[in-house]
Amino acid sequence: MFDAANSGQTLLAPNTELAAALFDWVERQHLALGHEIWPTPRIRDFSGWLRERYAERQLLDASLPRCLNDVEERELWRSVILESDGGAELLEPNGAAQSARRARRAVIDYGIPLQKLADYATEESLAFLDWNRRFEARCRELHCIAPDQLLASAPTVSGLVWIESPIWRPVVRRWLDSSAIAMLPPPRAVSAAPPRAVAAASPAAELAAMAEWAADHLRATPDFRAWICIPDLNLRRAEVADAFDAVLAPQRFLLTDADVPAPYAVAGGTPLADYPPVRAALAALAATTGMLSFEAVSDLLRMPQLHFSATDAAAAAQLDVELRSRGPSEADLADWLLLAETLGAPAMSALKYLRAFLTTLDSARGAHFLSQWVTLWIAAFEAGPWVLRQRWSSTEFQAAERFRELLASLATGDALFGKQGSVAAIRILSRAAADTAFQPQTGIPAIWVSAQIMDPWLTYDGLWLAGCSEDRWPPPLDPIALLPVKLQRDYGVIPADIEAQLQLAEDLQARWLLRAGNCVFSCADTSDGRPTTPSPLLPVSSEPVSSSPQPHWHAQALHAPPLEVLRDDAAPAFAVDVERTRGVSTLRAQSRCAFRGYAEGRLLTDRLEKPVPGFNLRERGELVHHALEYLWGQLKGSAGLAAMTSEPLEALVANSVSRALAKQCEQRDPGARWRRREHPRMTALLNKWLAIERLREPFTVEQLEQGAQIAHHGGLDFRVRIDRVDRLLDGGRVLIDYKTGNVSPDWRGDRPDNPQLPVYALLRPDALVAVAYGMVNAGECGFVAEHSRPKVFKPSRRMPSSMEGMPDFPSLIALWSERIEVIAAQFAAGHAEVSPTLRACSTCNLQPLCRIPSALDDQESADE
C-alpha cells in the first residue's frame, strides 16, 4: 500500500472511515521514515471517488446531467413520496424517504432486477416501485442523475488499486475486479497474546473495562494503537464519551471553554445541527418564522454566541428576569426586541446583534430561489450569531465551515427546489443540517472507536469488539425495508439471511484475530440487570471484569469516608442601615421556616416567573384588587350598594373591570385577545362577590388600598398595605384582605403559615372587631374571618371563628403581638435553622439548598 500510494496510484476503500485510516497510516509512515515532504496520497472512498470522476467528465461535456448531492437526493425522495398516492398520510415521510433511498441502493448494489421485485407484488414492493418510478421521472425532468447511477457510466481509469474487504457490494466488487490493476490483501499481525473474552455486569462496566484497557496499554506503550468496535455506538455516543473521558481525558470535565485533546476519537459524527455555531444560526432563523415563545426568546438572548463579554451575559440574565414579569407568553421577534429595548437594554450586545440579524433578513420578502436565500442567510449570520466568530474553537470553526458547504450545496439546487418562501426555505435547511453527520478533523488518534462491524484492514496493537453476546453476535437479521426478504436472500443481501450473517461473522472474527496481537471480545448484562450469555461463536470462554462504571466518582461516592458535620444555623444579624425587609412576606417565610426566611428575605432567592398565555394567577389577583378598589370607591359602603339598581350597577362593574385591565396592562399586556376574554370573567366574578357583600350587616368603607404603612416589630420596619378597612354602625372596625384562591385561617398557632392579618390588626387595633380574608374566586366566594361578633359576616360552617380561646379581640391582639415579636426578633438576630412547619415544604423551592426533600416529591421523607 505504501508503494502504491507513493507511485501516484489511486487507492480505493469501501467507506470514508477506512479511507481516513489508510491516509493517516501512510502519513505516519512518512514521518517515521524522517520525511519532511511527500506526495499527497490518493486514497479515496469509492463513492467519493465516483463523484470526483463524474465532475471531471462534466467539465469536458456540459451536456451530462448534474449529479444530485446528498441534500438534494433526500429532499427529492421526500417530495416524490409526499406527492404519491397516500404519501400525505404517512406519519414520518422523512423515514419513508430514507427507507426508499436505502432500498434503491440495495437494488443497484446487489443487481436486483426491478421486474423480479414487481413479480412479488407486495404492498411494500409496489409502493417502492411507484416511488422509484416517480424519482427517476423527476431526475429526468431536472436533467439530474442520482449518485447510485454513477457506477453504470463510470469510464475505465488506469492506476486503480483497491483493498480487499468483505463489505464491498457484489456489483462494485465485479466492477473493481474488471477495472482495477490490483487488489491489496490486508496485512497480518504477529500474535503476541491469546484472545480474551470478558463479561461485564452492565453496559457501563463494559465501557469502563474498555477505557481502562486502553489506558493501561498507553501507559505501558506510549505508541500503542487500538481499534474498538461498539455496534450500538450511535445510541450510546454520550455515554461512551463520558466513560472514555473519565479515564483517558479527565481534564475535559474541568469548567473551561478550551478544547482539550484526547488520545481517542469516536467515529461517525453527530448531526451538524447540534454544533454551537450551527445551532445558534438555526435558532436565530427559526425565531423569524412566526410567533416566538418566551422560552425560545430567552434561549436566544442568553446564547453565548451573542455575548461579547461576561458583563453582556449578566445583562442578558437580568433582561430574562425582567421579561418574565413584563413580557407576553409569545410574540414575534421584532416585538420581543422592541420590548427588551424599552426595558432599558438597547446597548446589550445580544440585542444589537439580533437587531442587525433581523434587519438583514427584512431586506427580502416573498419567495426566492435557495441560492438567493443562502446569500442572505450568510450575511445575516455574520451580522448576528456569527459576529464573534474570532472566539470560536477549532471544532466550532470546522462545524461552521461544514455548514457553509451545506449551504453551498443547497444553493446549487434552484432547479430542484424552485422558489421558496422564508418558512419553507428554513425548514429545508433545518432538515439538511439535522440529517448531515459531522465529525471534527483531529487526525486518527491512538484509540479509534467505531460503530462499523467491519475488517479494519490495517494492523493494530489491540482490538476490542463489544456487544458479543449470544443475541447480538452474529448480528440479528436486519432485512432492508420495502424489499421482499426472499428476494434479498436470493441475491445475497447478507442482513436478510441468517446463514449469510453467520458466515460473515465467522469471517470477520477470523480477520480480527489476524489484525492485532491483543484481541478482546466483550459482552454485558443489560442495564436493568437481566443476564446475557457470551456468544458461542467466540474463540475462547469469557471471564468476568471488575471495572467500575464510569465516571469513577459515581462509584467512589458510595464508599466515601464519613464527613464531619458542622451545623451553623446563625446568619449575621440583620443590618438595618443596609438591608430592607420585604413586608409581611418576610415574616411569613420566617414563621414557616427560619432558613426560608433568611434565604427569601435576605438572599432574595425568589422563584423566577414564567410568562403564561393570558393573565397569570398573581396578575388576576391584582386585577381583583384594582377593580374592587375603584368599585368601593364609588359605592362607599353597603348603603351605596343597596341603593344601586341593576343597570347602573352593571355599568359600574364593567367600568371597574375596564379600568383594572388598563392599569394591569401597563405592567404586562398579554394581548387584546386575552383582555377580551378576561373582561366577562371578571364581571361575573365581581357580581358574585357583591352578592356576598349584600348579606353583611351595614358598613361604610373607611379605607381603600391606602399607601404603604410601616409596622414596627422586633426592632425592624415592615412596609404593609391594607386592602380595606370597614366601619360598622356602632363604630367597630373590620380589616379585609382579598384573596383569589382557596384560603383557610392560616394565621393561627405559635408559628402561623401566614401572619398577615395579625400584622394588620397590630397596625390598626382601635375598635377592631374582626379581621378577614375576602375569598373572591369563581369556585366559592365568602369570608374566612376571626371575629368577636357572630353577625359581622354571613355565618361560615366550614371555618368558624375560634378566637384561639381568647375572651375578646383585644386579648387576641395581645397574643398576636407576642408571636409576631418573637418571629421578627428571630429574623433580626439571623436565626436561619432549617425548621419547616408541617406544610411549608410543599410551597418552597429551596430544597437544593436546605436538602429537605419536597413534600410533593417524597411524602414519607417529608413527613419524617
Image (cartoon, rainbow, N blue to C red):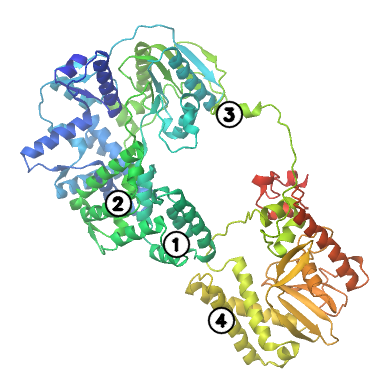
Q: Earlier in the sequence, mark 2 or mark 4?
A: 2
For image coordinates 68% across by 50% down, the residue present is 856
User: How far across and down, in percent of the image, does residue 500 sit?
Assistant: 34, 21
Indicate the secondary structure of the residue bearing disc 1.
loop
User: How far across and down, in percent of the image, does residue 377 sit?
Assistant: 28, 54
Q: Earlier in the sequence, mark 2 or mark 1?
A: 1
Q: Earlier in the sequence, mark 3 or mark 2?
A: 2
- Horizontal side of 836 relative to 427 (left or right) equals right
Q: Are marks 4 and 3 in contact (CB under 8 Å)?
A: no
Residue type, numbered disc 4: Ser
Q: Are marks 2 and 4 in contact (CB under 8 Å)?
A: no
Q: Is residue 291 visible?
A: yes
The image quadrant that residue 372 belongs to is bottom left
Q: Is residue 292 above or below residue 523?
A: below
Neighbourhood count class around disc 3 (C-alpha, 10 Å): few under 14, some 14–19, many 20 upward = few
Estimate the spatial distance between the alpha carbons at disc 2 and disc 1, rounded to whole Å: 22 Å
List the residue tagged with mark 2: 382
Estimate the spatial distance between the alpha carbons at disc 3 and disc 2, rounded to whole Å: 42 Å
The image quadrant that residue 373 belongs to is bottom left
Estimate the spatial distance between the alpha carbons at disc 3 and disc 1, rounded to whole Å: 43 Å
Viewport quadrant of the N terminus: top left
Name of the residue lying farthest toward the front? 577
Indicate the secondary structure of the residue bearing disc 4.
helix
For image coordinates 41% across by 31% down, the residue present is 260
List the residue tagged with mark 1: 345
List the residue tagged with mark 4: 658
